[in-house]
Image: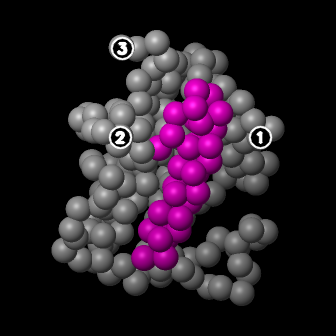
Amino acid sequence: MAGNVPPIADEREGLLAYLEQQRHVLRIAAHGLTEEQARAVPTKSSLSVGGLIKHTAFTEDGWIDILLQKPSKPMEEAMKDYEAGYVMADGETLEDVFARYDEVARRTADVIAGIADLGQPVLVPKGVPWYPQDVEAWSVRWVLFHLIEETARHAGHADIIREHIDGATAVPLMAAAEGWPETPWLKPWAPAGAV
């Protein structure tokens, strides 16, 4: 996937394409990282690139559960899962995190493909302090916009963390990940010491 979303035919295709693009740029922040670097917490924040990818997959999966009106876990258990979702577990690899994110992306695409009307209501969970209590329902469309927003926010976080790890920035990383040729004005990222 290149730096821009390709032309789209309709709203559904556009929403899914922009969500996929944000997933892609989030993954690019991990391009070329070692397992140790993917776990690194190089800023005052407790965030790592691998943890952000894991969290974003967890969050997207949770929103699809809300869309499907799946019963939620008790709050204490849900909060433990939420906190664990920011950290790569012992023995968990970046490949594991990517595989989970791919699984979540496929699930999202499958669920959205089965919904005829993006205006279909998605009931707002009650008793959760960060959800509005004066709103009865969002729409499927709103959920997709929210997932794009959430993924883009964390892609930006991952970019900052990655730059702290080794100085790599988004466009040279994208050029390296996608195999763009070197030009007089853009050199794809390469690990330090690579020829």
C-alpha span from label 3 to label 1: 33 Å
What count of labels does the image hold?
Answer: 3
- Mark 1 Cα shell of 10 Å, populated few (<14), some (14-19), many (≥20): few
Q: Which residues are magenta?
A: 141-170
Q: Nearer the viewer, mark 1 or mark 2?
A: 2
The residue that label 2 is drawn on is 186
Write the residue at 65% across / 33% down.
164
Q: Tell me the amino acid under the disc marked 3.
A: Val
What is the three-letter code of the residue carrying label 2? Leu
Residue 163 falls inside the magenta stretch: yes
Q: Residue at x 37, y 55 (%)?
A: 21
Disc 1 from disc 2: Cα separation? 30 Å
User: Looking at the rendering, which quadrant does residue 165 occupy?
Assistant: top right
Tag 1 near tag 2, CB within 8 Å: no
Label 3 element class: loop
Furthest-front residue in this view:
184
Q: Which residue is mark 3?
A: 195
Q: Earlier in the sequence, mark 3 or mark 2?
A: 2
Q: Position of residue 3 (x, y in %)?
A: 33, 52
